[in-house]
Image (spheres, grey):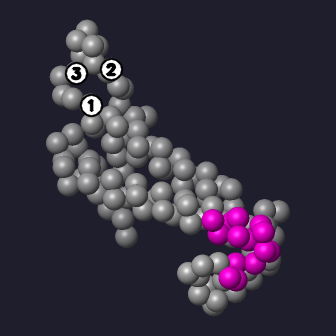
Amino acid sequence: MESKRMVSAGDSPGVEELAAKLEKLKRDQLYMREVNAHFQRFATCEGYPGMPESEAAEIDARVWKSDSWEKLPFPGLALFDNRGEIQRIERWLDYKKQPEGCEAARGCQLKTPPHDAAAR
């Protein structure tokens, strides 16, 4: 289960955790898009590289038995939510990379804190 602790400005391990989480979210996003593309092309997850046949059959059954109008293994909302989380963490890490004491008068590009000032 994920930790919900706040990451403070000088919290190097926390920033590293966020960077690791960001990489995982990006891998998940790519995986979901690739599986959806495979499903759209072949109307099944079977044959997707690296996916066990039992998992592919389970996903196929879930998709075809679903009452949803969106017949994909990973609906658009799942991709949208994941992308939003990626962007939120990227903004937070970008904000943390700006030098301390950066002032607009000294030529620094002053960035405002992300929408939710504490990373989850």
Q: Secondary structure at mark 2?
A: loop
What is the CA distance from the residue labelled 1 to the residue labelled 2?
Answer: 8 Å
Q: Residue furthest bottom?
A: 54
50 or 92, nearer to the observer? 50
Taking the spot 36% from the left edge, 26% from the top edge, the residue there is 112
- Mark identifier at residue 56: none
Q: Which residues are magenta?
A: 34-47
**Residue 36, magenta (yes or no):** yes
Q: In which image quadrant can residue 114 be found?
A: top left
Looking at numbered disc 2 in the image, what kind of residue is underneath it? Gln
Tell me: residue 99, above or below residue 45: above
Residue holding disc 3: 102
Taking the spot 21% from the left edge, 39% from the top edge, the residue there is 9
Can residue 66 be seen in the rendering of this structure?
A: no
Q: Residue furthest top?
A: 105
Q: Are marks 1 and 2 in contact (CB under 8 Å)?
A: yes
Residue 47 lies, in percent from the top left, at 68, 82
Residue holding disc 1: 98
Residue holding disc 2: 109
Drawn side of residue 29 relative to residue 92, left or right: right
Can residue 101 be seen in the rendering of this structure?
A: yes
Q: Quadrant of the N terminus?
A: bottom left
What is the CA distance from the residue labelled 3 to the residue labelled 2?
Answer: 8 Å
What is the CA distance from the residue labelled 3 to the residue labelled 1?
Answer: 7 Å
Report how many numbered discs are placed on residues in the image: 3
- Rate crowding at label 2 as few (under 14), some (14 to 19) or many (20 or more) other CA atoms within 10 Å: few
Tell me: residue 113, above or below residue 102: below
Q: Secondary structure at mark 3?
A: loop
Looking at numbered disc 3 in the image, what kind of residue is underneath it? Cys
Drawn side of residue 46 relative to residue 99, left or right: right
Taking the spot 33% from the left edge, 53% from the top edge, the residue there is 19
